[in-house]
Image (cartoon, rainbow, N blue to C red):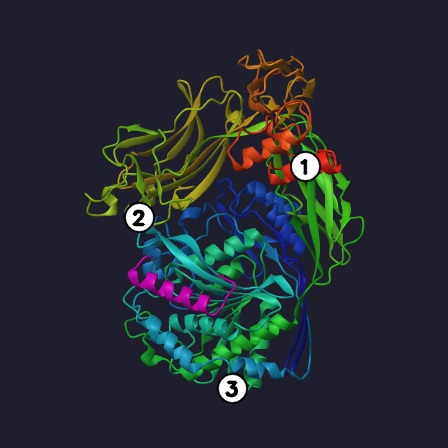
């Protein structure tokens, strides 16, 4: 949850006290019903945001004062019932035919119908135009998948005059080196045309990661995403480096730029090599400087094909509820016609404060000396992505825009490195000042101390332990830490957590019945911020109550585990293949990273292009092996990739079906396509078999890809299939048996858990016969052992429903012996010492039992035991084994 921020910004000419409230009501990625009318809904307060979030409307795009949404008549009535202001833009709108002009006030695309225009936002009806055509002909992007989160932030500003006095800023910005910027620029210019999935892209990517690693960042990671490029879905990568904060590690400042270039043979020195090298140089300058907040350096991919990298990151950051204070987006900051002027854009009133800080700092330091031209907006850059998902940020761009960008002339010849150096210093100074002066509101951070159990045994209490960290001056109100839980569909209970000290709290979850589903979350109250939930007020951890878990299949498709392929398609049948041979998936882009999955027509060696090896003229079937699902609840986890593409969307009419196999019958469980779920991204699903049917015979899962449409391209993949059986058969929980002694009475009670008591126990194979021991029907292992060898047997337990569980045991037998009687003459004398010496030094027979030798209690039979016996026999020393505990 993103909490409010209080900001004290001390800059030249300004003292800014800034309050920011960000409450997210999310329906990210939600499946929304078809809605056809386009509205603008005005969001002027937090209550309005909550109303829109709860309306079920499909939220398309954030605009000034509110959002563009798709809704139906029922949703419109919902708006009206809450007096939520709205206006209808257009009736009968097809979501798949909408596209956005991200170039704002530049040349308008004239091939499509303009639906809505306000400031930099232009929404068009583009009919069946492909995304590739939209990007190439109009620099337009389609509406992001899923409904956007609805955000409202209320900012209050108090501005006063003050003088800044931080001598360290001069020292810090002096670390920025023009020579470094020149070196970096020349290096990356050599990778001409560095766009997704090209050789130069890979080499530039490796160079970025290498430099960030050499600067000592805490971690450098590749963030993989899928982007549509020239009609193919390709694997692309953001490169991310982290510098963890010392005081507020959960709060983040992002400094980012895209590193890809325009695809038509452009060196990309200004667009966006200039932003790229500035990010690297700031990372180098901060390498040895402690920062209060976490600084994240991100080099975004596929910006030049429609903001893919930043949209991917911003969407996932919103889903994680990342606490992003400010995003600095750098795009084209080096054109040689610029000297002292800089364009700074801010999308929201909250972000304007950050832009003003940069402006004040830029004129305050002689080595920067820039005049910032501040205005509202995002530009046609990655800042758009963060604005749409509710994150504050500013865009930093050259004042006079290059007229040779996106061309072979965009080279270092046309860069002004003095200008680039000053801009880089200004961004570094601003980020450092925000890092030092933005103070998050007091908060509480939660951590589970133990692994959250996904499966719980019936009849047993489970400990739930959590740590609550008081963050940024936050104070936990004593006695307010609670756990909220529900068993099945029953009543919700709220119970206090037990304070264990040191910020740790615990609770013993009541013993639930077998086959139950338990869900729970945690809450606590902070003095100034109110009640905070973990994970959130409407999200819960879930545990299932069963006796055992059996992984029946775990398949990454690196080996053949018995799948079968059939169907009548002319080509495009399923094959288990390495993903680097498949154009649309690319190397290492199977779902689980193992390198293999099932693909439709994987071997492309006989085809001229990727359009020749899709599924055609029928269907192809992939069937799993069959599994016994009668002894518990079976859960199937799987990942699928499906692409149903057509240059004309009217031909995009094929579907991908997933079904359960149960004997001779099929049960359809999911359909992808023709539009939803058919855009070429890996999707992970969980299927609970017992929610669909009650198995009476073995079950399996079937994947069917088909292509009956004209001029369409159908491809599919399956990966990471796991079949898990949550069993309610009785489970023996006795894990070992205490040792028995020969010819001495023995009794031990066996234990089991299950769903249908009482249990009936038995010696499955009759292995106890002749041992002097027996296992009674009520679970007592008892008798007088008459054999000296270890006894191996299998215990089986049966419940009232006839379900059984079993376990193998070994019972070790000790002997009844005189300690020190090594030669077994039933007396302790010098002969025993001699016997031990012969055994140790002359390979004589071992004492029987060997324990009789261990008279000095050191756990071994050695010469010390012989000495011990001699002292006892001749000098009245301690009795053998007298010192044993």
Image quadrant occupied by the C terminus: top right
Residue at the disc numbered 3: 367
Q: Main secondary structure of the magenta part?
A: helix
Q: Nearer the viewer, mark 2 or mark 1?
A: 1
When the figure is inspected, residue 341 is found, relative to residue 747, above or below; the finding is below
Q: Which residue is pictured at 23% across the width and 33% down the height?
A: 570
Q: Which residue is pictured at 46% across the width and 57% down the height?
A: 311
Q: Which residue is pictured at 51% across the width and 57% down the height?
A: 314
Q: Position of residue 302 (x, y in %)?
A: 38, 60
Range of residues picked out in magenta: 197-219
Q: Quadrant of residue 431?
A: bottom right
When the figure is inspected, residue 167 is found, relative to residue 580, above or below; the finding is below
Of 846 and 736, the residue lying toward us? 846
Residue at the disc numbered 2: 580
Q: Which mark is residue 870?
A: 1
Looking at the image, is mark 2 or mark 1 earlier in the sequence?
A: 2
> Is residue 260 among the parts visible in the rendering?
no
**In the figure, is residue 219 to the left or right of 816?**
left
């Amino acid at each position: 949850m993103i909490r409010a921020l209080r900001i004290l910004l001390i800059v030249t000419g300004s003292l800014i006290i800034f309050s920011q409230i960000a409450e997210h009501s999310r329906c990210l990625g939600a499946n929304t019903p078809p809605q056809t009318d386009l509205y603008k809904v005005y969001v002027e307060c937090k209550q309005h945001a909550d109303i829109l979030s709860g309306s079920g409307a499909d939220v398309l795009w954030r605009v000034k004062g509110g959002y563009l949404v798709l809704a139906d008549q029922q949703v419109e009535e919902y708006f009206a019932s809450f007096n939520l202001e709205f206006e209808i833009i257009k009736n009968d709108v097809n979501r798949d035919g909408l596209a956005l002009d991200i170039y704002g006030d530049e040349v308008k695309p004239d091939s499509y119908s303009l639906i809505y225009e306000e400031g930099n936002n232009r929404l068009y009806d583009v009919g069946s135009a492909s995304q590739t055509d939209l990007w190439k002909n109009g620099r337009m992007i389609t509406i992001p998948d899923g409904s956007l989160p609805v955000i409202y932030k209320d900012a209050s500003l108090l501005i006063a005059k003050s003088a800044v006095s931080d001598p360290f800023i001069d020292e810090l910005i002096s670390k920025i080196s023009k020579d470094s910027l020149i070196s970096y620029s020349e290096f990356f210019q050599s990778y001409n045309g560095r766009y997704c999935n090209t050789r130069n892209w890979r080499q530039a990517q490796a160079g970025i990661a290498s430099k960030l690693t050499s600067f000592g960042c805490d971690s450098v990671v590749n963030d993989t995403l899928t982007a549509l490029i020239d009609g193919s879905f390709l694997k692309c990568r953001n490169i991310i480096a982290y510098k963890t904060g010392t005081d507020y590690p959960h709060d983040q400042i992002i400094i980012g730029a895209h590193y890809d270039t325009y695809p038509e043979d452009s060196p990309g020195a200004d667009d966006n090599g200039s932003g790229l090298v500035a990010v690297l140089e700031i990372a180098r300058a901060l390498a040895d400087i402690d920062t209060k907040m976490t600084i994240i350096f991100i080099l975004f991919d596929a910006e030049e094909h429609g903001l893919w990298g930043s949209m991917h990151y911003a969407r996932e950051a919103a889903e994680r509820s990342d606490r992003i204070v400010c995003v600095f987006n750098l795009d084209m900051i080096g054109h040689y016609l610029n000297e002292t002027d800089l364009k700074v854009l801010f999308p929201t009133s909250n972000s304007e404060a950050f832009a003003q800080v940069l402006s004040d700092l830029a004129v305050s330091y002689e080595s920067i000396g820039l005049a910032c031209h501040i205005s509202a907006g995002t530009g046609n850059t990655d800042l758009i992505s963060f604005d749409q998902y509710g994150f504050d940020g500013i865009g930093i761009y050259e004042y006079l825009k290059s007229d040779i960008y996106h061309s072979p002339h965009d080279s270092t010849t046309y860069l002004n490195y003095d200008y680039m150096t000053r801009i880089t210093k200004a961004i570094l100074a601003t980020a450092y000042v925000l890092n030092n002066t933005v103070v998050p509101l007091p908060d509480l951070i939660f951590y589970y101390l133990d692994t959250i159990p996904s499966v719980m045994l019936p009849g047993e209490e489970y400990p739930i332990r959590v740590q609550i960290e008081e963050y940024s001056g936050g104070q936990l109100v004593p006695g307010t830490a609670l756990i909220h839980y529900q068993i099945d569909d029953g009543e919700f209970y709220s119970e206090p957590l037990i304070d264990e000290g040191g910020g740790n709290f615990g609770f013993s979850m009541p013993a639930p019945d077998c086959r139950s589903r338990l869900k729970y979350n945690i809450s606590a109250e902070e003095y100034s911020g109110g009640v905070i939930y973990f994970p959130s007020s409407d999200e819960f951890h879930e545990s299932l109550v069963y006796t055992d878990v059996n992984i029946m299949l775990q398949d990454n498709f690196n080996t053949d585990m018995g799948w079968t392929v059939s169907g009548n398609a002319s080509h495009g049948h399923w094959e288990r293949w390495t993903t680097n041979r498949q154009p649309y998936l690319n190397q290492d882009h199977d779902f689980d990273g193992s390198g293999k999955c099932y693909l439709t027509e994987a071997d492309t060696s006989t085809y001229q292009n990727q359009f020749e090896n899709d599924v055609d003229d029928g269907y192809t079937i992939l069937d799993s092996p069959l599994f016994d699902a009668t002894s518990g609840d079976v859960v199937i986890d799987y990942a699928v990739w499906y692409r149903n593409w057509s240059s004309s969307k009217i031909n995009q009419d094929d579907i991908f079906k997933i079904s359960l196999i149960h004997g001779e019958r099929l049960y359809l469980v999911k359909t992808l396509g023709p539009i939803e779920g058919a855009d070429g991204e890996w999707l992970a699903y969980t299927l609970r078999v017992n929610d669909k049917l009650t198995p009476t015979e073995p079950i399996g899962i079937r994947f069917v890809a088909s292509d009956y449409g004209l001029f369409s391209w159908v491809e599919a993949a399956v990966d990471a299939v796991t079949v898990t059986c949550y069993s309610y058969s009785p489970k023996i929980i006795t894990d070992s048996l205490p040792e028995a002694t020969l010819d001495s009475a023995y009794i031990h009670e066996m234990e089991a858990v299950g769903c249908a008591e009482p249990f009936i126990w038995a010696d499955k194979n009759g292995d106890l016969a002749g041992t002097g021991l027996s296992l009674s029907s009520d679970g007592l292992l008892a008798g007088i052992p008459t054999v000296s060898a270890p006894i191996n047997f299998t215990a089986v337990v049966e419940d009232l429903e006839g379900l059984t569980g079993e376990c193998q045991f070994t019972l070790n037998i000790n002997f009844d012996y005189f300690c020190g009687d090594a030669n077994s003459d039933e007396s302790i004398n010098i002969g025993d010492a001699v016997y031990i010496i012969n055994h140790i030094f002359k390979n004589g027979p071992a004492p029987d039992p060997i324990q009789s030798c261990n008279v000095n209690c050191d756990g071994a039979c050695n010469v010390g035991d012989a000495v011990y016996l001699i002292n006892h026999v001749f000098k009245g020393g301690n009795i053998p084994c007298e010192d044993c505990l």
